[in-house]
Amino acid sequence: MGDFNLALVIIAVVVCVLVLLFNVYLLINYQHPDDANQAYFPKFVVVFGLFIAAISILMLPADVANRQACRHAIYNGACNLTLPMKELWLAVYIIDAVLVFFVIPFAMFYYEGDQDKSMGKRIKSALIWVVTTAIVCALLLGILYGLAGKVDFSVRHLSSDTTNFPSNWDFSSGQPCIGGSGARACSAYTANTSSEKTWTMRTTFPEYVVALATIVGSVLFSIFGGVGIASLPLGLIAAFIRRPKAVITRSQYIKEATELGKRAREVKKAADGLRQEEKSGSKGRKWRKNVKAVEKELLQLEEDVKLLEEMYPQGEKAETSWALTVLGYLAKLVLGILGLIVSVAWIAHIVIYLLIDPPLSPFLNEVFIKLDDIWGLLGTAAFAFFCFYLLLAVIAGAMMLGLKLVFITIHPMKWGATLMNSFLFNVGLILLCSISVIQFCSTAFGYYAQATAAQEIFGHTLESLRGIKYLYKYNVFQIAFVVLAALTFVYYIAFVSFQGWRRKKPSGKFQLSS
């Protein structure tokens, strides 16, 4: 048993190193050329933030494996070299909260500061914003913790007489328990609801911080995750349906390229006008709305340019390029179908296991257990995949709503063209939602992940926290998740899937304030 636990510790160290190297690889390949050899602090924050997010997701499968390492022990202390999961959970999520609410905002303020100012002034300006935020958050957390930082557990006071150890174990409706001659011999079995009482105790401050961060993340997760769980696979399938069916002629290419050039000049003209308004100090509501419109049209313009290049490949390897384009869309179809199966499995599991009381079936919990029986880590790997898929759904949902809603800022991730502010925004979103993903998974897979440190934090404490427990008691976030997924599915079927390869051309007109 000790050897198995030592192997678990070694695997955890190796996985941490691999995750760190993969994050560096993503940063190098996604960063914009303008950020090369500079913006080192934001880059460090991005790599470290992605590391914490990935490790936090992987910690739940590790928590399950850590529990299984000691399942044959008589008591928990009989195991040696097991991971201190509760301390690790609290440490990771305190770091997560500090990154989301302090470090990442500081890095974004510093990166987006006026480049004409000196480094000292940019740091000073960013610190002012972050320190102000820190003071407000500290006061708010202190007040909330003092007033409502308690957990209310529903308990029953039970008592029973003692009796000799029986020679046989015969139970029936007339003999439901091992009873003696006393009047309260079976009170632990026959206790009525009147024996139920509320046991109140104060939670620790770190657990309270994690709980509040989970609530904030759960709101975003239920919105972005609900939309993304449907838009992620359906978007891939819709891309295949709207794919270019054949190479266009040169005359068609020139006509479309001319139209795109005209739109590009309109976008540039609008952007120049908005820049002049910014310098003059007229940054009102209409200005922000126009900035959003320019960003959206610029993204659509870039997408149309990419689609036009696919429709008319040029150069000596034009045929090879077209063949790769066809294979790329086939890959999107395959990934979309697989993703749709996973999404449907997620929605079905939420309805069957969480929304229906009592649950109709353990469903995916039972699947993971059977996979573990086939091979020790197969169920754990599948468990980790389903948790990671939720994070991908959150990112997909944020991107979709960012293109549709005015009040959500667009921060696209593009290979070789992602600025650090977009990197930081998406890392912050992933970190904030990763807490909720873990809480959601620990609840959804409670049968598989039972008796873990995650369940102690996210199950017992969070779901009994005063003022918050009713959100989980009535499954508010799960219901919102399923409803938004259903609405998104209807939206894709009705409005998106069968459109042609070209987007609807925006008007290119912007109402400037001046």
Image (tube, rainbow, N blue to C red):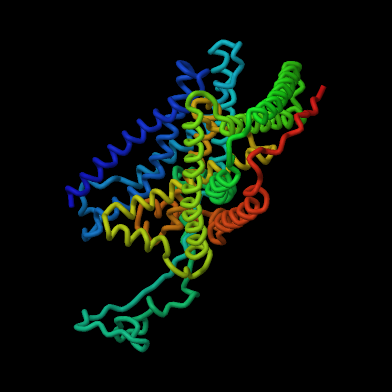
* Coordinates of residue 439 in the picture (x, y in percent): 46, 51
Tell me if 209 is positioned left or right of 187 in this view. right
Q: Position of residue 89 (x, y in %)?
A: 38, 44
- Outermost residue to the right: 514
Q: Is residue 348 above or below residue 308?
A: below
Image quarter of the C terminus: top right
The front one of 246 and 301 is 246
Is residue 490 shown left or right of residue 96? right
Q: How many marks?
A: 0
Report x, y in % for residue 186.
Answer: 36, 80
* Residue at 33% from the left image edge and 86% from the top image edge: 172
Q: Is residue 216 visible?
A: no
Q: Nearer the viewer, residue 258 or 433?
A: 258
Identify the residue shown where x is 48% and y is 50%: 339
Q: Looking at this rendering, what residue extends furthest in the bottom direction?
A: 174
Q: Residue at horizontal 39%, vertical 29%?
A: 25
Q: Residue 404, can we see it?
A: yes
Nearer the observer, 373 or 300: 300
Q: Is residue 147 above or below residue 353?
A: above
Looking at the image, residue 7 lies above or below residue 78: above
Q: Position of residue 216 (x, y in %)?
A: 56, 44
